[in-house]
Amino acid sequence: MARRIAGIDVGGTFTDLLMRDAEGRVHLAKVPTTAANQAGGVLAAIEAAGTTPDALDLIVHGTTATTNAVLERKLARVGLITTEGFRDVLELGRRTRPRAYSLMGSFEPLIPRDLRREVPERMDARGAVVTPLDEDAVAREARALLAAGCEALVIHFLHAYANPDHERRAGEIVRALWPNSYVTLGHELLSEFREYERGTTASVNAAVQPILDRYVARLQGELTARGHQRDLLVMNGNGGTVPARHAAREAAKTVMSGPASGVIAAAATLAQSGLSNAITCDMGGTSTDVALIAGGVPEVSAELSIAYGLPIHLPMVDVRTVGAGGGSIASLDKGGMLKVGPESAGSEPGPICYGRGGTRPTVTDANLVLGRLDPERLLAVREPVPMERVRAAFARDIAEPLGISVEAAAEATLRLANVHMSGAIRAVSLSRGHDPRGFALFAFGGAGPLHAVALAREIGIPQVVVPARPGLTNALGCLVADLRQDVVNTINRPLDEVEEHLVHATLAAQRDRALAALAEDTGEAVAAETLHSADMQFRGQTHLIRVPLHGPSSTRAAMQAAFESAYFARFHVRLPEIRAVLVNLNTSVIGRRPPFALDALLDPVARTGEARQGNRPIYADGAWHDAAVWRREALSPGDRVEGPAILQQADATTVLEPGSTAVVDSIGNLRIQVSA
């Protein structure tokens, strides 16, 4: 039976929607995000797509609610109950600094010290009881935290990953007297060693749990009131989805769901394009997100930090973010050197050309000055701004102090932004043993296609892929994402001391737990795939390498060989004399949703119009060039465009640098061959 499915991504500036109707046609919408209540933007996007909630069979939703709450520290008031003597673990953290080369800096933990309470209890690293749990102290401290105005609570005991009995009992006591469901037990969210990371992950979960719960309940209520009968799915940071009724229970997993959805869309696009290796580059208004896809599979990591001092040790698509976006401000530092970002004009006031009150030159303004953007086609413009005003800002802030032309100042702004982005690309490729010359650059977001060719040339990447709808790629990710459940357990023992039956039993239990969670929403998954892996290290080392395991019956010899192979691929060093340690066992169960044919994104009506739209001068490599202007929606598979050229569409603009060539493939991607 044909179904109507909508993927909706809420960004900082726009809320994007892609909907596939019962006939297989695709409908698009892009509306301003309603920051005060994101549900308003979601409903507006549904209306703009020409449908109503009651007509939709499924809504898959990506939200920035939890990510923004953490970054802006607009969080719930959280209390902590922990092992006696360990209240300061979250503040001591690791031996790091907010700024690596500075003696100055500050860090504010999510839970202030007066809300971190201790109770007598203790487990050792093997799970044996050292000090029994003082149950009266648990109840007493919970009541004190309630009186202090805490809305959510974390219970985080030492070595609970090895034996969670004390955490479970404390949870029973607290839940009997706590007025809501916002109680997070550290081991339930993450059964992994390292008290700091596990505690911080639990703290993030508790701090965003009420925020996400209220938002999802409000959105679900609005949809239900308008006739939508299904529980919507919510994107997680691991690239999978979960039913909304379960999303708030593990709210920390939704952090970074927006960037993850774009990477999932890229992987789906590559699979239907016959490509398997790509580096994704999602450039928006305030930042650029970069990730690596090898063999068709996005890199996933459980060692990411959303900000300094806030590691979240949950499996997430490994996305690196740099402060280079369309709104990044260009200025001179105290030494007279040009800098771009991390300060951003944001959406309010935004770049000068948006006419919202911005007065400082940005990357978007630089693209406009150099002819790469059409001033008549800019989105989100409140009042048109004369080009002279934009040029005057570059002259005042950059060109005149440096003694260069306005064009040179704007081009330097773009080049420096590209340098920041290329650093992130090298971090996800070269630093991990991947040669970027063997990958394509998959560029999307509102600004990604503007910079992609110059960025690829900077790094030596031979091919750029720009999807059919680059500005709506994150919404596409919601549309194509599968369901996913991840489970982790710590072993933390030398591999040659680990009994194989323990490995097999742990992986089997993880698989059963994940399948049971997936079975709660059997209506969406048409098939289930189970993936096993191990986090391993050489003894004495700190960082982990994730090694795929071929089935739940892996032997010690097979794990040792797989780890040594992965270590050599990463560092080109062999250490046969050092023992390997099995730190964690991981299982992921992926519920595959029905596939979505991406050629449906092509608009047959638009292709009947005239593709060539004239010419416009653009500035590149220190000179003006006469560039052909094309309407991208009118191009058909097989069409070829020579650079310099500008390809315009409703949601993005693609710039072909001189010497580059683009060909439209069978599903509407631009395959751009980059000149040396």
Image: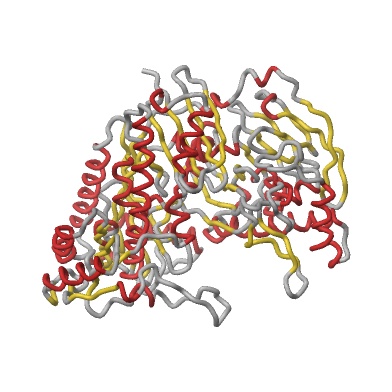
**Which quarter of the figure has residue 608?**
top right
Against 633, residue 622 (above or below) is below
Question: Would residue 422 be seen by someone viewing this image from the given angle?
Answer: no
Q: Nearer the viewer, residue 600 or 651?
A: 651
Against 555, residue 217 (above or below) is above
Residue 421 lies, in percent from the top left, at 63, 56
Residue at horizontal 48 percent and vertical 20 percent from the top: 24
Identify the coloring: secondary structure
Q: Nearer the viewer, residue 315 or 109?
A: 109
Q: Is residue 384 left or right of residue 249?
A: right
Quadrant where the N terminus sits is top left
Residue 551 lies, in percent from the top left, at 29, 46
Residue at horizontal 88 percent and vertical 65 percent from the top: 403
Residue 636 lies, in percent from the top left, at 67, 23
Q: Report the label total.
A: 0
Residue 416 lies, in percent from the top left, at 72, 59
Q: Is residue 174 left or right of residue 354?
A: left
Q: Nearer the viewer, residue 618 or 68?
A: 68
Residue at horizontal 43 percent and vertical 72 percent from the top: 108
**Which quarter of the figure has residue 147?**
bottom left
**Which quarter of the figure has residue 615?**
top right
Question: Would residue 541 be seen by someone viewing this image from the given angle?
Answer: yes
Q: Nearer the viewer, residue 383 or 108?
A: 383
Residue at horizontal 36 percent and vertical 28 percent from the top: 228
Against 484, residue 403 (above or below) is below
